Image (spheres, helix red, strand yellow):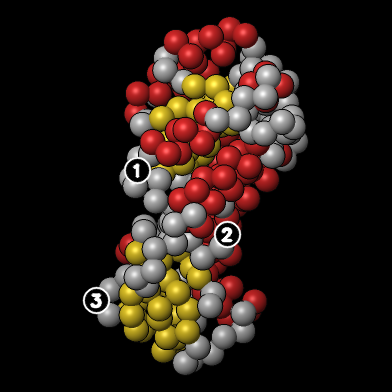
Amino acid sequence: MQRYFLDTSHFKADYVMITGEEQKHIRRVMRMDIGDTIVCCAIDRCYTCKLSEFADNHIKAQIISEEHVDKELPVKVTIAHGLPKGDKLELVFQKGTELGAYEFIPFEAERSIVKWDEKKAHKKMERWNKILKEAAEQSHRQRVPKVLQVQKFSCLVSMFKEYTHVLVAYEEAAKSDEKSRLSEVLEQMKSGDKLLLIVGPEGGFSDREVIEMKEFGALTCGFGPRILRSETAPLYGLAAISYHFELLG
């Protein structure tokens, strides 16, 4: 069933008013008609709705029932990723959303080849939010993850205190065959806990960055014996977290 994330202002007592791009998608792409059903979401609540009225500038959908099956990870996982080259970050946003990420924090690392251009920030954020919204709809999420403005490394470190646990995917830990820390942290976590998972850019972290993150309470960990690309590591982490909390039961 097609899913749409809408502003709360679109939701009335027993119906939803659909306008803009969502209205066009229903009409022109999905070619729906009166009586067809869709799912409309606002913040973290979703409703099954039946299309009941087509007008020139809106579609009205009657609310039938609320969705009660929880489709979100029981722990809140924020992915912090050092700015990579090309469109790798967009891949992380899309696939990370499908895998259940709660939030994303891009940051400038010492070895980031790409430098953040403030002049292009607004357009970048618009594109990133569109990618997150579409991925959340496609994967039947009940909320759209947030993406924060690009942070300086020092700002990222100052945010550690907001999380229950902070893990750093570190290639030197993988090279030394470290395998237990991710599992140990997941065993300690309970529903509602907040995990910050930090991944570096293509060149990894500098020694100074690793030392500073450890001083502020972060733990370094390996993701198996193989060295993963920067865009693969957060997806590995999310898949492992999903397996631990959603499949092991």
Per the image, label 2 sits on a secondary structure element best described as: helix
For badge 3, the amino acid type reads Ala
The relative height of residue 244 versus residue 174 in the rendered view (above or below) is below
Front-lying residue, 19 or 192: 192
Q: Looking at the picture, how far across and down is residue 210, in whole percent? A: 56, 13
Which of the image's four quarters has the C terminus?
bottom left
Of the image marks 3 and 1, the number of the one nearer the N terminus: 3
**Residue where numbered disc 3 is placed:** 13
**Residue where numbered disc 1 is placed:** 190
Packing grade of label 1 (10 A; few <14, some 14-19, many >=20) is: few
Position of 206 compared to 15: left or right? right
**Residue where numbered disc 2 is placed:** 134
Packing grade of label 2 (10 A; few <14, some 14-19, many >=20) is: some
The relative height of residue 21 versus residue 48 in the rendered view (above or below) is above
Q: Looking at the picture, how far across and down is residue 216, in whole percent? A: 42, 14
Q: CA distance from mark 2 to mark 3?
A: 26 Å
Of the image marks 2 and 3, the number of the one nearer the N terminus: 3
Farthest residue, direction left: 13
Position of 26 compared to 114: left or right? left
For badge 1, the amino acid type reads Lys
Position of 94 compared to 3: left or right? right
The relative height of residue 113 versus residue 232 in the rendered view (above or below) is above
Q: Is residue 185 visible?
A: yes
- Front tag of 2 and 3: 2
Q: Looking at the picture, how far across and down is residue 145, in whole percent? A: 47, 48
Residue plotted at (58% across, 7% down): 208
